[in-house]
Amino acid sequence: MARILVVDDDEQIRTMLVMTLEEAGYEADEAADGRAAIRKQREKPADLVITDLIMPEKEGLETIMDLRKEWPSTKIIAISGGGRAVPGDYLLHARHLGAARVFRKPIERSELLGAVRELLGEGASLTKGRRSV
């Protein structure tokens, strides 16, 4: 079973993402910021990391750079709802730093799960429903 680490400072979003992933059959763990994510990744590496970009302590772009250095084969999905800049700007930077996929919040459940399946080499079978997470 693939292991996925969800990194977001918003507890509700983290919870919804973890529930969505677990319902789809994945083992999901969570971290509230990049610092906690790197610590968890060192303890038990995830196959895929879904990270927000705007967070306290250690933000997502720095987290992506650290993941690329220590775990170059770990797949990364970056998500962002904005901040001071346009969300697309942050997401473009995340893509250049090594995120395989990027999404603006709110994320369509089926799109997220399709990307997860594709990145984990499981094909992109569609999940019913278009709920946002």
Image (tube, rainbow, N blue to C red):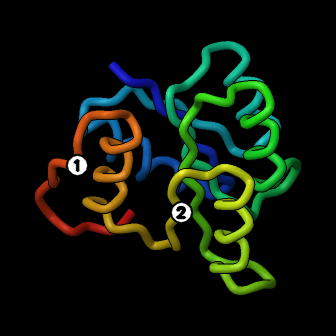
Are the residues at dot 2 and dot 1 in contact (C-beta closer than 8 Å)?
no
Secondary structure beneath disc 1? loop
Comparing 17 with 62, the one in front is 62
* Left or right, residue 13 beside residue 90: left
Q: Which mark is residue 102?
A: 2
- Name of the residue lying farthest toward the right: 57
Name the residue at the top extreme: 43
Q: Residue at x 22, y 49 (%)?
A: 124
Sequence order check, earlier mark of 2 and 1: 2
Residue 80 spot, x, y in % from top left: 61, 68
**Residue 97 relative to residue 110: left or right:** right
**Residue shown at 43%/42% (left/top)?**
18
**In what quadrant of the picture does the N terminus appear?**
top left
6 on left or right of 123: right
The secondary element bearing badge 2 is classed as strand
Instruction: Find residue 84 and name its label.
Output: none
Residue designated by label 1: 124
* Residue 130, x across and y down, in percent: 21, 69
What residue sits 25% from the left and 67% below the top?
131
Residue type of the residue flagged with mark 2: Val
Q: Quadrant of residue 112?
A: bottom left
